[in-house]
Image (cartoon, helix red, strand yellow):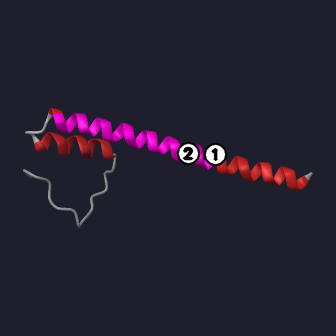
Amino acid sequence: MPKVQSTLHAADLTLMSFLKFIKEQVEEVATMTDLLAIVTRNKDDLEDIEEYVARESGSDATDPTAPRVAGA
């Protein structure tokens, strides 16, 4: 019986990994859908788009190799 339990445990871990992957993909699609809506609505105002991306990325760390912000 231990082999059966081990196999079931491995299957559970595989399923959990797959479900986590699906959840992340759904989140990415939602994020890109929101970004597309923002870009479509503000296509003539790149600064608003940059502000949205900066705000939504949630990262306060600055990348020293990143180009400067437009209009700054």
Res. 28 image quadrant: top left
Is residue 59 covered in magenta?
no
- The secondary structure making up most of the magenta span is helix
Residue 31 drawn at (x, y percent): 35, 40
Residue linked to disc 2: 20
Tell me where the magenta segment starts and ends, as one range: 16-40
In the depicted structure, whether residue 50 falls above or below residue 63: above
Tell me the residue at 68%/50% (across/down). 13
Label 2: how many Cα within 10 Å (few below 14, some 14–19, many 20+): few
Tell me the residue at 22%/62% (across/down). 66
Q: Is residue 28 left or right of residue 20?
A: left
Residue 56 drawn at (x, y percent): 31, 42
| Mark 1 secondary-structure assignment | helix
Q: Amino acid at mark 1?
A: Met
Tell me the residue at 7%/39% (across/down). 44
Res. 42 image quadrant: top left
Residue linked to disc 1: 16
Label 1: how many Cα within 10 Å (few below 14, some 14–19, many 20+): few
Whether the residues at callouts 2 and 1 have beta carbons within 8 Å, the answer is yes
Q: Amino acid at mark 2?
A: Lys
Residue 37 drawn at (x, y percent): 24, 34
Q: Residue furthest bottom?
A: 65
Is residue 21 covered in magenta?
yes
Q: Is residue 16 left or right of residue 60?
A: right
How many labels sit on residues? 2
Q: Residue furthest right?
A: 1
**Viewer-side residue, 12 vs 60:** 12
3D distance between C-alphas at marks 2 and 1: 6 Å
Residue 45 drawn at (x, y percent): 9, 40
| Mark 2 secondary-structure assignment | helix
Res. 38 image quadrant: top left
Tell me the residue at 31%/37% (across/down). 33
